[in-house]
Amino acid sequence: MKKADLQKEELFIEHYVDTGNAKASAIASGYTEKSAKSMGFYLKRKLASQIEEKQKDVLSNMNIKSLSVLERLLNADSENVRLNACKLVLECNGFSKDSNVNLNVNDMRNSTDEELLDELKTILSAEQLVKLNS
């Protein structure tokens, strides 16, 4: 295979991962507009495993950035921001969006562990407590 074709394929992978549009990716990679639709279809199938790997890399990098942002939110000065970040973490880990987690954080700061656990029990359903304990 010619070096130019390999470069076009690499460009196609990059553009396709960014856009998800095979025809536009073929055009951006240097294929003619006349052949772009068929070449896009062909390259998408031919390069499927490489496209998938590239997508995984992109998502992995996004996860790192997302976790960094989430960590900053969990440590924010605003109690409301911290609480909403905690809710998001719980939701992402299978806890229901329907859980009502509207607490007055200021009143809870001086609570004992037992008082906090009692409050948590009122917030989470029995099924969610099972998940928490397992």
Image: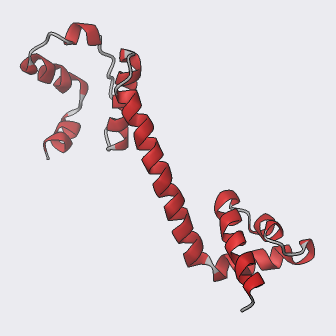
Q: Which quadrant of the view contains residue 8?
A: bottom right
In the image, taking residue 94 as reference, residue 48 lies left or right, namely: right
Judging depth in this view, the residue of 89 and 73 nearest the camera is 73
Q: Residue at x 15, y 9 (%)?
A: 110
Residue 61 lies, in percent from the top left, at 48, 53
Q: How is the image coloured?
A: secondary structure
x and y, in percent, of residue 32 in the image? 89, 75
Coordinates of residue 76 in the picture (x, y in percent): 38, 22
Left or right of residue 69, residue 18 in this image: right
Question: Which image quarter: residue 118?
Answer: top left
Residue 97 seen in render: no
Check the image and name the residue furthest to the top: 107
Q: Is residue 57 left or right of residue 118?
A: right
Q: Which residue is painted at 73% across and 63% down in the image?
A: 21
Q: Is residue 46 above or below residue 108?
A: below
* Most foreground residue, 131 or 65: 65
Q: Quadrant of the N terminus?
A: bottom right
Residue farthest to the front? 3
Q: Does residue 117 appear to the left or right of 42 in the view shown?
A: left
Residue 121, image x, y percentages: 17, 26
Q: Quadrant of residue 84?
A: top left
Q: Residue at x 18, y 37 (%)?
A: 129
Count the labels in the image: 0
**Residue 1 in view in this figure:** yes
Residue at the image position 32 percent from the left and 22 percent from the top:
101
Relative to 68, residue 42 above or below: below
Against 9, residue 130 (above or below) is above
